[in-house]
Amino acid sequence: MTEVELQLRLDPEGRTIASEDFCKSASSLGGKEVKMDYSSKTVLTSLAETGTETGSIDSKLFDELLYDCEIADCALLPRTFWMHCDGKPRCILEQMALEVFKHHVKDGVVFDPSTSGAEWWVQIRPSPPAGRYNLLDDKEDKDKDADDLETTGICFHWDKDEDLRLMMGGTMYIHPHISTVTYMSDSGAPTTALNYTVNPFTGEYFSPSDESAYLSWPKKGKHLSFDGRFLHAAPSNLMPKGAFQKQIKISDDITDLKKRKIQTRRQRRVTFLVNIWLNYKPFNVEPFPETMIDKLTKVNEEVPHVLFPEKEDVPNCLDNEVENACNGSDNGTTRFKWPMGGCGSNESISMNLNLESIQNVMNDGGNVQLRWTCKEGAKGVQLIQSCNTAVDSSAGQDSKRLKVI
C-alpha cells in the first residue's frame, strides 16, 4: 500500500499559489507585483512569417519542426512533457515551450520557480500512422460521434493534472494557470474555450451567470491563450461539410513520395500546446526522454527566438463578436451537442450557435467572441453530468492523504 501526501495552496479562484513562506520572502524584496493576464486572446508569432524576409525561420526549418511534432505525437512516448521555467532547452520544441512561458509570465509576477514550468505536447489531425490517437487502445470502444470528433477534432475537456485526478478518485481538478495553442497550419477545427469551470475538489460543474466563449480558427503562426480552468475543445462539425477533407487533400500533381509526406505534414491540423503551471508541477510529467531527444531539431544559435521576439511588439489579432439566441430556431441559431471527453459515458455538452457568422471568418483564420442572449432561466450552454468520472480501477487500492492549505 502506498501513501500520497500533497500540499496545495489555492487562491479563491482555485489557482495554485506559492507557499506562505515564499510569498513573505518575495514581498520583502519590494518592487511592483505584476498580475497574470487570464483573458482569452490571440497574437501572431514569428511563425506566421515563415519563409519570408522578415521571418525568423525558413521553410526548411519549419518543415523540420513539423516532423518533430510528428515524433512528439508518437503513441509510444508519454502524452505530455515538462520544460522547467529555468531550464535550458535541448531542442527547438522545448525552446518554443519556454518562450510561451516567458511570454505570459512577465517580470514581476510572483511565483515559485522550483515548481513552475511549461507542460507541452502536440496534437495532429488526422493522426499519423504512429500517432497517439491512431494507436489508442480504446478507440474501437468509443461511440461513432466521439470517434468522429476525435479523428478530426478534439473533444471537450478541462486541462488538469490528470494523474492526480485519478489518484484522488476522479474528482480532483488542479488546473494550469494558462492554457495555450500555437497553430502550425491553417487547417482544421476551431478551438473553442468556454467560461465553464469545475469545483477543484468535487468535479462539480460551475455554471456562470454570464455565459461566454472564445472561438479561434487555425491560422499558421497564431497563438491562442485562455484561462487554464476553462472548458475547451476543437469541434470539427463547426466547419462546413467536406471543408477539412479539402484542406488536407494532397494534389495529385505531387508524385514524389518524400514531397508528398512533407506536404501532408503542412496541410494537417497541427497544434503545439503549452500549459503554464505556476507553483505546482503535475504528477509524472517529465522532460522529453533523453533517449529520443537526438531525433528532434536542436536549438540553433542563429535562431534565438522562434515564436516571440524578445524586444518587439507582438501583433494582436482582431476579434469578432457574435450573439447567439438560446432558442435554436431564433436568428439562424443551431443547437449542437457533443460528447464530453475522458468520461466514457453519456456526459455531454450542448449549445446554440450562429453557425453562419462563425464560419464567415474561417478562411481568414479569425476569432469570435461568443455570447448568448437568453430569457431569465434559459441557458445557451448546457452541461449534462450523468455519470461518475471514469477512474483507474487500481487507484482505490492505495491509501491517499491530501493536505490543502
Image (cartoon, rainbow, N blue to C red):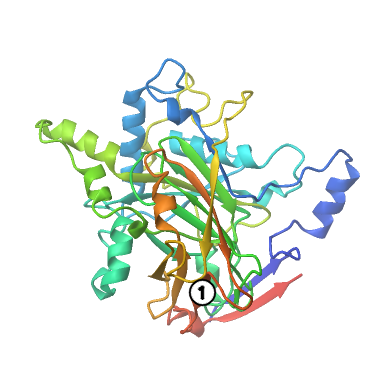
Which residue is at 33% across, 24% downward?
Answer: 59
- Which residue is found at the position 47% from the left and 35% from the top? 90
Question: Nearest the camera: 368 or 101?
Answer: 368
Rendering quarter of residue 105? top right
Residue sticking out furthest to the top: 53
Seen in the image, is 36 located left or right of residue 325? right
| Res 138 visible | no
Residue 124, position in %: x, y? 33, 49
Relative placement, left or right, of 12 versus 129 is: right
Front residue of this view, candidates 13 and 39: 39
Label 1: element kind: strand
The C terminus appears in which quarter of the rendering? bottom right
- Under mark 1, the amino acid is Gln
The residue depicted at 42 percent of the width and 69 percent of the height is 329
**Is any part of residue 117 visible from this angle?**
yes
x then y, percent, for residue 82: 51, 49
Q: Report which residue position mark 1 lands on.
A: 382
List x then y, in percent, for residue 31.
87, 38
